[in-house]
Image (cartoon, helix red, strand yellow):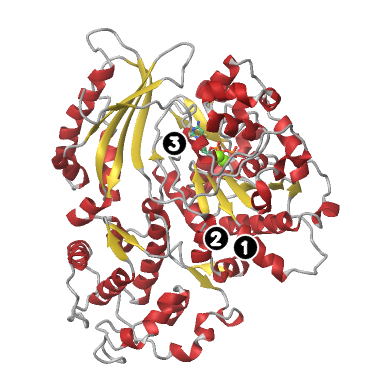
Amino acid sequence: MDNGEDEVEEDETEWEKSFVNSDPMSPATAPGPSLSKTSGPTAADRVILHFDLDCFYAQVEMIRNPALREVPLGIQQKYIIVTCNYVAREQGLTKLMSVSDAKEKCPQLVLVNGEDLTHYREMSYKVTELLMSYCPLVERLGFDENFMDVTEMVDRRLVQTLGSNTFSFKGHVYNHLSADDKAGDHPRLVLGSHIAAELREAIYSKLGLTGCAGISTSKLLAKLVSGTFKPNQQTTLLPENVTDIMGCLSSLRKVPGVGHQTAKKLQALGLESVKDLQLFPVNDLVTEFGGPTAQRLKNLALGIDSSPVTLTGAPQSLSDEDSFKKMSSTKDNLSFIVCLKTRMHKDGRQPQTFRLTIRRFTVTNKWFSRESRQCPIPNHIGKKIISGSTDDAVVQLVPLAMKLFHKMVDTNAAFHLTLLNVCFSNLQTRGAAVSGKGSITSFFTHSASPRKTQRQDDSSQSGGGHCLHHLPSTQIGITQHTLQKTVATKSSEAALRGFKWNQSPVVAVEENPKSNPGPDETNGTAMHQLPPAIDPEVFRLLPEEIQKELLSPAYISSFPSTSTSLSVPSTVPDGVHVTKKCPQPFQDSHDTKDIKEVVNKLDPFMSPNCLQAHVHFQEKMSWNKGNFHFPSLLTLSSQEMWTRRCFQSFRRMFKKS
Ligand code: DCP
Ligand code: MG
Ligand code: MG
């Protein structure tokens, strides 16, 4: 067996990893109204939102071609309708119906092929970015779902609304026809429902998408309640109704966090329903699952989940797959490696590990029996993958894939597979950056590609569909508190009330700057000191500490003369590149050199001032293992998102030539 090779069990759907234990388990108690409080006062005070877009792929297609809005529309992958619009649903169509059944039910059904996920992926990230611009604590779940921890936003609003007795919920309240009498007892959830409504409105007005939202005190409960009323509605779950909603789940598989394999093991213990699990002695579960998992399962069944909303960053791996009714020869079946290679090239990071997954045909266990082998990617092949030359890389990759394939499948005997998946993981930024297309430059050159900002496993699927949700992978830990303190600003909340979007989806611009006092007004006297090429509007959007630094005498005096030193005048016409000498000589540390090299190589239209801005940021952050680090932020994902936002602001600020 090759060094580094490993067998990976992928049977469980990965999104359940989102519901991991984050703190010591609450004692498992009998279900009852008080359950939601057993995870501690902090957990009970949280306000968590869950968003799920309506008929997502179909909506994207309807935006691309509005004529499709009025007709029953199905999105086809292979012989399955992976989703359909609500016009089609009114005619009895459901998700994951076979094309033949769907056509039979609705002969006028219009089908669009949905095997190329590019547009869905792009729209998906736009939604996440939009949400993050209001409150940074957003976690993606699949392509069309996001969790958001708005606890701090709610805290701030609570202070503003103290003494007000005009509270009422927006949208539905689970199991209450009218919950106005409950509003006074749950002011935090009331405010959460208002924020959810405002965000849904923002998603609609900025991106044209409708969706549902759930509002509750945990990810588990917010997700469970969000689809209660569909489409385009929202529902709040009160703590006193937790038992009701858990009791309504038709099987253990309906509990977010209980995957196929877990459900099977529970079934083997004689547990079928959520109630069975609630009542099952935790000690007996420990024997089967071990302590932590046993307690987690028990808690999930009781509606207890204290897992944090974990900020989503760049994908940890890129994968692509194809499914077949029957694959019994290896010929031509790996052609989709080409697309994956192209995505990896665009991403810019160099993958270190290559994984091949197969699914064998079985009558009983159709969708869940995956097997994988992985191996390290030799450096020279890794370099080829991220280089522009597709043919060369694919030629090198196919033998690698075949070697892994032969480890799993004896091709001398007959075989019957139903799926192949290839995956690049262990993505290294440093090598990529130095070799030309790292994440730093992506901040400058690929602002439209949200992929760089995801820490989620960004898998593609083309066909089959069943149970192949786009799956997030392991979460990175970050204390919400620290993160929110660092990143959440009042302006992000103010954005909910009347900010409009500029071209870049991650830069919010005030609709009426005069009515919203911004940093320029708070330190208005300093605004006139801005170097001339800086756009004051963009300046206002920068984090306060960076504004301060830009206005600091040290920074301003780094230009030969404050008023005329910048080589790019504020009215540089588009496309004109002014290449005067950079006003400030670089301190040529090793790191700075790297950045210069990358920028010089890859962004030919970047002005020296942009470069200086870049280096300015480099000074503020440390260059560590190929990633920028804001010292105050704890995780790569937050850094990536944040630096990207700053860079985008900088790009506009310097009116890129
Ligand atoms: N999807 C897929 N294969 C699956 C499940 C879903 O390709 N097995 C895709 C198509 C969906 C998208 O993921 O559009 C989101 O999945 P949802 O379950 O949220 O379904 P929809 O958003 O389409 O519909 P709904 O309005 O019920 O949320
Ligand atoms: Mg959906
Ligand atoms: Mg969904």
Residue drawn at 17 percent across, 65 percent down: 590
Q: Nearer the viewer's eye, disc 1 or disc 3?
A: 1
Amino acid at the residue labelled 3: Gly
Q: Is residue 216 visible?
A: no
Q: Which mark is residue 114?
A: 3
Query: Is the CB of the residue bearing disc 3 within 8 angstroms of ligand 1?
Result: yes
| Label 3: element kind | loop
* Disc 2 residue crowd, few under 14, some 14–19, many 20+, Cα 10 Å: many
Which image quarter holds the C terminus? bottom left
Task: Tell me the crowding category of disc 1: few under 14, some 14 to 19, or many 20 or more residues within 10 angstroms, Cα based.
Answer: many
Nearest the viewer among 487 and 284 is: 284
Among numbered discs 3 and 2, the one appearing first in the sequence: 3
Name the outermost residue toward the right: 181
Name the residue beneath numbered marker 1. 153
- What label sits on residue 368 in the rendered view? none
Task: Quote the CA–CA distance across marks 3 and 2.
Answer: 31 Å
Between 174 and 101, the one lying in front of the other is 174
Secondary structure, mark 2, is loop
Q: Are marks 2 and 1 in contact (CB under 8 Å)?
A: yes
Q: Is residue 91 above or below residue 195?
A: above
Q: Is residue 80 left or right of residue 339?
A: right
In the image, 197 versus 479, the foreground residue is 479
**In the picture shown, does residue 495 fall above or below 379?**
below
Up/down of 94 relative to 634, above or below: above
The kind of residue on which mark 1 rests is Met
Residue 135, numbered circle: 2
